[in-house]
Image (cartoon, rainbow, N blue to C red):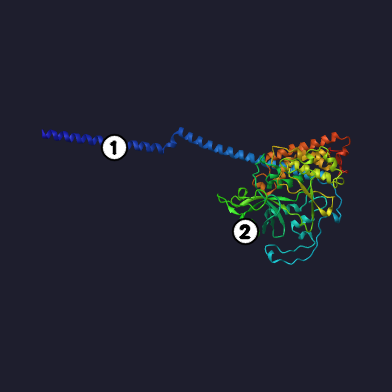
Amino acid sequence: MRVCARRRSRTLRLWLLIVFLSLHLLVVSLVLSIYHTSCELHSYPGIQTSISFSVQNASASTSTMTAAGSDTQEVEMDGTADDLAKLEALYSHPLYNLPTPPLPDGDWLLKVRTEKKERDANEDDYDPILWNASAETHPPWLRFHLGISRWQMYQHKDPNLSALTQQMASHRIVSAVQKSGGTQLKLVMSFPNYGQTLFKPMKQERHEETNVNLYYFSDFERHNAEIAAFHLDKILGFRRVPPVVGRLVNVIKEIKDITTDHKLVTTFFTSPVGNACFYGQCSYYCSTEHAICGRPLKIEGSMAAMLPDLSLAPRRSWRSPWRRSYSRSKLAQWETDSNYCDSIKKTPPYDRGTRLVDLIDMSILDFLMSNMDRHHYETFEKFGNDTFLIHFDNGRAFGRHSNDEPSILAPLVQCCRVRRSTLLRLHLLSLQSYRMSDVMRASLSQDPLAVVAPLLTEQHLSALDRRLETVIQTIQDCLQQHQHHSDVIHDDIGDYPGIHGSIPSK
């Protein structure tokens, strides 16, 4: 019995060993099979096709996106080139190159007087003065001042403009102080060559429209409006806005660290997100709630060339006859009296010369850029009443592109008087080959801030074309209301071909 039990026990152990070995071999074979499958995955045609197709799709998608981006870029470049070509053609048109007789000495605002000046101890940051009677030795700002005449701020295709705007956009700033007066923050900045600019910082994004609930006298002053006004005034052939250019300014290094304005310094602070901010002192929008903040250090702004000092070239300020009431409840007389212009035509200096059509030129400019804030204008005293009106302080323009303000055209509507040269240029800018929005886009693209974002949105550019049609139609209405075209058209270019408002072919 014991021998049988032992034999059964051996047999059982033997069978268990065989089963164990068999299971072990089975596991090993399965592992090897899986390993072989993973290593030989590429040998299966179906899987290979799937992977290959996915890679090809990804490549095709990337190529398509690259091609699309390239096409878009090419279209934009082609559009920019076309616009620049239109701008060049516009400035080459005979209407912008009318012959003018040489100006007598008395028609230039300033003359060079060579006299040595002792260097002040506080002028270490400034360049030594090496100027003489030769214009080649003059810095751009001085050439600009010497180029101001009785009839315009600068000459057509003035070669100095490029040097002047380049200086304002890039030269080292050695001083920055707040300008006194005015309702909003402005800084006077100085350069090593003694040039100065008026800096207006960015307060509103380009795409933002003015709040419809704000009165015109409570609106922000926009830096891009100052820049755009200079370009539009030039495109209209007026040349009455001092040169303006955009610039990125370091809030700390180019303002706080170099200013001698102690009141300004006290308004600097760091925002909760770490941006450098300041707000200055002024009537409107100078508080922590309306602070000017860098991102984190640099801010955009407009740099306008300063006019000659008042001690050298005094200016006279004139109250505009079509000034608004600047009241929430009252209207100005011109808003209620349809015959208002009849009395203005009898009032000096509007009763003679070109002052009335000068004012109407300014109203056309203001209507195109929707500027309701033209309460005063200035002229240089030296030239008396026979001179151009200075078209500066345009920060409240280009506030709303979705709305046109017809009351800005009141001087034109009520007086029905316009320069022939102005009318011809307006007609020219309404043509497809010189379309105002296109040439304006091209002109603004040359500003340094255009690399950040377009100075005017497409909606604002479209509004220019729409408003231009309104101005031309208003003049046509005036021509229909009067028996003689000479009652409406002030012919300042009698030798130029063409009759009344028509555009002659080139």
Mark 2: amino acid: Asp
Q: Which mark is residue 160?
A: none
Q: Quadrant where the C terminus lies? A: top right
Q: Position of residue 271 (x, y in %)?
A: 57, 50
Measured as percent of width and height from the top left, residue 432 is found at: 76, 37
What kind of element bears circle 2?
Answer: loop
Residue 443 drawn at (x, y percent): 72, 45
Figure label count? 2
Q: Which residue is mark 1?
A: 24
The quadrant of the rendering that contains the N terminus is top left
* Residue at the spot 13% in from the left edge and 33% down from the top edge: 4
Q: Tell me: 51 left or right of 312.
A: left
Residue 299 left/right relative to 230: left
Left or right: 96 as drawn, with respect to 65 = right
Q: Classify residue 423 by image quadrant.
A: top right
- For mark 2, does the 10 Å Cα neighbourhood hold few (<14), some (14 to 19), or many (20 or more) residues? few
Residue 480 picture location, percent across and down: 85, 33
Discs 2, 1 touching: Cβ within 8 Å: no
Pair 2/1: label in front: 2
- The image quadrant of residue 237 is top right
Instruction: Report the amino acid beneath label 1.
Output: His
- Image position of 276 with respect to 124: above or below: above
Q: Disc 2 designates what residue?
A: 257
Q: Secondary structure at mark 1?
A: helix
Compared with 307, 457 (above or below) is: above
Identify the residue at the far left of this view: 1
* Residue drawn at point x = 74 percent, y = 51 percent: 243
Separation of residues labelled 2 and 1 (CA atoms): 82 Å
